[in-house]
Image: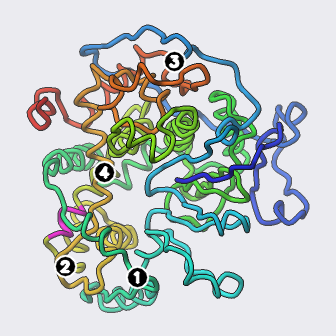
Amino acid sequence: MVLDSPAYHPPLHPEVFHADPQLKSGGKKKECPPCTRAQQDPLLSHLSLGRKESDASGPGGRTKVLKPLRGLEARPPVRSCLAFQGPCSWMHRSESSCTVNRKDWARGQIRSAASLPYLPKARTEEGAHTAGKRSPCLLVALRPANLEAERERFFRSSCSYNPQFEYGESVPGTVLEKYKEASGQFLSQAIGIISAVLEKYGTYESFEASNGGKLLTKCQIWSIIRKYMQKEGCSGEVVVQLTEDLLSQAVMMVENSRPTLAINLSGARQNWLEGMLRHEIGTHYIRGVNNTYQPWHSMEGRKQYSLKPANPTEEGLASLHSVLFRKQPFLWRAALLYYTVCQAGRMSFCELFHDLGRYVQDAGVRWEYCVRAKRGQADTSLPGCFSKDQVYLEGILQILRHRQTIDFRLLAALGKVSYEDVDHLKKYGVLEKARIPHFMQDLERYMQQLNHIVTTNCLNDEELERLMPE
């Protein structure tokens, strides 16, 4: 994500939560059932509480206990938005977010780069006359203009028709070239993770029902979000919106020059919501804030210090934090995305759709995975893939492989950097104002949970070392 607000200094006030369009337009606020926090917090009037993610300690294994770094001790919550003060205001994230160009930012509008299938259609009316002057957002360009029509035609054909996608904006050839080849390096591990879930639960839907918990009400979601923001000391910095329009679990964007997190109401489950917040806020947002203080905050600075790309570390770390502290921290989504891309590289759309039937029962969900893997293609009867989604599992396995030697607090404090650059950069890093996610304060417990993730997903250190030798 790129957060671009060079002249913005947010007021010192609590976060603004928009539960529905009525609140944005000045309409009356809908009442929620009473709760004990109503008098303490008028913004969260009448909230009921949802249970936090279950905690489980896994097998022991080797545990690395790191001493607190000077300047990185737990610090009290701050009320101002440090990410947007000072000379540098760029924060970079990867695909599962939104990007803003300067013209859109000046008008207080966003251009989404959310992961498919949630990609907004091209704007008409007000912004149409300038559309040709903008460089296209990558994932807007990769969203087929006829997606809904082809979806209907595909299912009318009893899933025997290969979609013929059309694109409203020219798809960058260099990008398609970069991501045209799928990797099979971790295919065995991906299948192993998927198989472990199905062996234990029969179907993913059964796993979700058993472990995710009940769907939360809006009031319960607000309560969990408020508590989490207080844990990270970022109350008042991130606007949160609830919506029923997202097909992904959540998306980060910039709206009216403020970092904004949109959460899908239909995916907010009792035991998994905090994991999503650790992914988006505790990892992407905090590392982005810390990055603004570093001498490599700009592209010129990254070149000066010879930095490797932030991914796959960025998405790998965030994905691990999504399942951290779950009793059953299966890496299903990362594994299935990796597998789907591998198969797309050698299958048509129809073949891929039917192949995924062995793992995913829901036909609508299978369609979405196939579109992600086939985006950028026009004739999907041909083999081919868009391999960017493999970054999640690749990053996860790299971090787990080196978890005994990574300084995780420094990895967070140094900003948007690869784990491979931490040792090189630690003597240059600006750590006085660095934030550390609350779940990294107890490093011994943090390492135990990483070990638990390894065991749950049928991985082992010998296998990881063989796959990724020094």
Q: Residue at x 47, y 37 (%)?
A: 296
Q: Residue at x 65, y 18 (%)?
A: 75
Q: Dot 3 corresponds to which residue?
A: 441
- Residue annotated with mark 2: 348
Residue 411 in sight: yes
SS at circle 3: loop
Q: Disc 1 versus disc 2: distance between alpha carbons? A: 22 Å
Q: Alpha carbon of mark 4 to alpha carbon of mark 2: how far?
A: 22 Å
Give the mark nearest the N terminus, 1 or 3: 1
Q: Amino acid at mark 1?
A: Ser
Query: Element under label 1?
Result: loop
Q: Residues within 10 Å of mark 4 (few under 14, many from 20)?
A: some
Residue 438 in percent (x, y) is at 56, 24
Q: Nearer the viewer, mark 3 or mark 2?
A: 3
Cα distance between the residues tagged 4 and 3 = 27 Å
- The disc at residue 170 is 1
Q: Quadrant of residue 461?
A: top left
Q: CA distance from mark 3 to mark 2?
A: 47 Å
Label 2: element kind: loop
Q: Quadrant of the C terminus?
A: top left
On the image, numbered disc 4 is attached to which residue? 391
User: Is disc 2 surrounded by few (<14), some (14 to 19) or many (20+) residues within 10 Å?
Assistant: many
Whole-number angstrom distance, CA of label 4 to CA of label 1: 24 Å
Camera-nearest residue between 154 and 411: 411
Quick check: 411 above or below 386? above
Asked if disc 4 and disc 3 are in contact, CB closer than 8 Å, the reply is no
Instruction: Residue at the far top: name it.
Output: 67
**Crowd tier of the residue under label 3, counting other residues whose Cα lies within 10 Å: few below 14, some 14–19, many 20 or above:** some
How many labels were placed on the picture?
Answer: 4
Q: Give, as a single range, the part of the protein colored magenta.
A: 340-345
Which amino acid, by three-letter code, is at mark 4? Answer: Val
